[in-house]
Amino acid sequence: MAVRLKDRYLNEITPALIQKFNYTTVMQVPKIEKIVINMGVGEAVSNSKVLDTAVEDLQKISGQKPVVTKSKKAIAGFKLRENMPIGAKVTLRGERMYHFLDKLFNVSLPRVRDFRGISNKAFDGRGNYTLGLKEQLIFPEIEYDKIDKVRGMDIVIVTTAKSDEEARELLTQLGAPFVK
């Protein structure tokens, strides 16, 4: 399944982008560099077991062991001390990245309630796309009965595109369901 998206990128999308943006070499064509999935778990401050379930969920979703992120500085208002574990993140590259992207666009996002498409405005000006999800239940690996709490996550798709227009075209060609 993952190889399908990579093959499509190499055989169909690359020539289409070369033609549309008049690139002189194949190396100028934007590609997806990595996908970073971040899950901030604020309640891990008071209950450390919550973080373990979040890490487990993230591992099921990505197929890779997440890194536990720690706080950089102490904030008394949040009862937070320096170096306390407060989240988890995963960086996907290569085959796993294409597999996750295929699953996200074709299986998971259509399962979101009242889904009309993802925003066109979530580009950062340098060709990267950020997507926020409100619940982990949209992924087929997460079983509804076994979750303790609905948690959201941020997904950042990092591309080598120079502009947002190029990145938008790349993601559209890869099958991103943008709002029409």
Image (tube, rainbow, N blue to C red):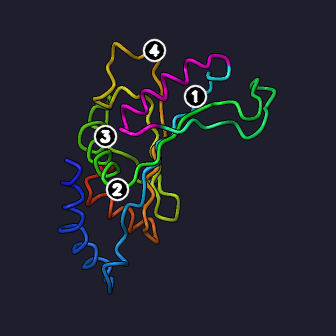
Q: Is residue 135 left or right of residue 13?
A: right
Mark 4 vs mark 2, CA separation in Å? 32 Å
The residue that disc 4 covers is 148
Q: Name the residue under label 2.
A: 94
Seen at 37% across and 39% down, the residue is 62
- The residue located at (47%, 31%) in the rendering is 152
Q: Closer to the N terminus: mark 3 or mark 2?
A: 2
N-terminal of the pair, mark 3 or mark 4, is 3
Q: In which quarter of the image is residue 7?
A: bottom left
Q: What stretch is highlighted in magenta?
A: 46-65
For disc 2, the neighbor class at 10 Å (few under 14, some 14 to 19, many from 20) is some
Mark 3 to mark 2: distance in Å? 29 Å
- Residue holding disc 3: 116
Give the residue drawn at x 32%, y 64%. Answer: 169
Question: Of circles 2 and 1, which is in front?
Answer: 2
Position of residue 145 measured from the top left corner of the image (x, y, whole percent): 34, 12
Identify the amino acid type marked 1.
Answer: Val
47 magenta-colored: yes
